[in-house]
Image (cartoon, grey):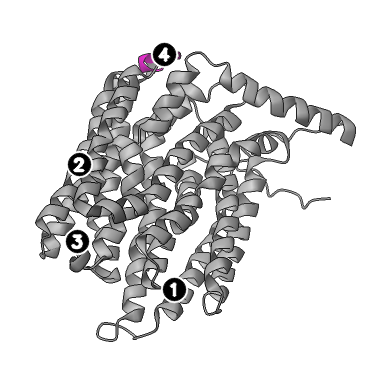
Amino acid sequence: MSAPEAPSPQRLHPLFWMPTLYFAMGVPMITVSVVASIMYKNLGLSNTEIALYTGSMYLPWVAKALWSPLIDIFKTKKFFVVFTQIAMAAGLGCVALALPLQGYLPTTIALFWVIGFLSATHDIAADGVYINAMTSKEQARYIGLQGVCWYAGKILSSGLLVSFTGYLHSPEKGLGLSWTRSWMIVMVLMGAVMLVMGLWHRFVLPLGSKAVVFDDRMTGMKHVLHEFGDVFASYFRKKGIGAMLAFILFYRLGEGFLEKLGPLFLLDGRDVGGLGLGNIEVGNINGTFGSAAFILGALLGGWIAARFGLKRSLIMLCLMLNVPHLTFLYLAVALPTDVTWITIAVTIEKLGFGIGSVALMLYMMQQVAPGNYQTAHYAISTGFMALCMMLTGMASGALQAAVGYKWFFIIVMFATVPSLLVSWLAPFPIDTDKDSVGA
């Protein structure tokens, strides 16, 4: 018999629990998908190896639809949120313990896979709480803030803590520790953050939905099998699902290539076409101006979608996502040495990413997810989004190694074309704009 839930704070305003919920979503995902890349770069792996290993770690987010129906059926979404947050805290602590081992690489990769599975499960439950607790109008109103809070988790993991590794490692500016010791300390800190989040949400998070109660195990198993099949069948019966999936798969195509190689480009030496920055500089760029730009962009993108409606503003949001990728092409061609100019360029890209990323999340939430299985259908949709990020991420390292950074960023710009095309053709079977315009 499981421990009783803490008193459900359904009366609490969403601003009391939503910010920390999405902050806790951002920390582990960015740790697995981005921070692990920087860590392995510091430990001597090549770009091709890093992109292949860390790109494949998106698989839990791709496959999470396979177990998402269980979260709609068993326990409560709050239970899964709290459990996975505490389990991820333990996983990050194990990564720290594994780093000094001789066989650290396969061990840490395996641990990151486990953390990825837990993080993907956490995302399903957290999105379920968000969707079930808010109306469509509220979803649009808070979608920008949701992105801000998620990005705050990224600020901590890929910004402040990456800079902290540079401080710990630098003999001139810090303590002169080895990269291994530096990353051990940071992984422990990340684990502590997730533990605090788990304890906090144990008391403040709404249930999300009531757990399903069965008369006996056989009835429960039959229900699970029926529901599992119906979840997927009903998803692929949705009107316009082919065009919807094309939009989900290709909207962030360019960003998928850029996500892995952007930070590695900043770290790589100038002899191989990179900018030769250190962890402190890269962490500061991502954790200060770049982060502020993303937050401003996410708020602006959410306001645009709520004010004008997603259907009317989709092409503009798509352009705002993709056109700023030109800044990385500029950096690869000009190779500026002034950190200020580099920071300005990255900040512009982050601003555009913040504005444009709102569109995909809101589209999946309002056009694809609605129905009897909102949480599961949203999870399936984000799984297809993760498939794009996984395949582009895995291929990005080998592609960059083959053509160099300049041509790599040119290819990123060509990826804008399919993104614009699927945005133009994206269907809107549910009219939510009438509730948004003039809000």
In primary-sequence order, the first of circles 3 and 4 is 3
Mark 1: amino acid: Trp
Residue at 62% x, 19% y: name it: 234
Q: Residues within 10 Å of mark 1 (few under 14, many from 20)?
A: many
In primary-sequence order, the first of circles 2 and 4 is 2
Above or below, comparing residue 192 to residue 244 in the picture: below
Q: Position of residue 163 (x, y in %)?
A: 32, 69
Q: Which mark is residue 402?
A: none
Q: Position of residue 360 (x, y in %)?
A: 39, 32
In primary-sequence order, the first of circles 3 and 1 is 1
The magenta stretch is: 429-434
Q: Which mark is residue 431?
A: 4
Mark 3: amino acid: Gly
**Residue contact between numbered discs 2 and 4, judged by CB atoms under 8 Å:** no
* Residue hosting label 3: 273
* Residue hosting label 2: 324
Q: CA distance from mark 1 to mark 2?
A: 32 Å
- Decide whether the magenta segment is chiefly helix, strand or loop: loop
Mark 4: amino acid: Asp
Above or below, comparing residue 389 to residue 428 in the picture: below
Above or below, comparing residue 30 to residue 11 in the picture: below
**Residue contact between numbered discs 3 and 2, judged by CB atoms under 8 Å:** no
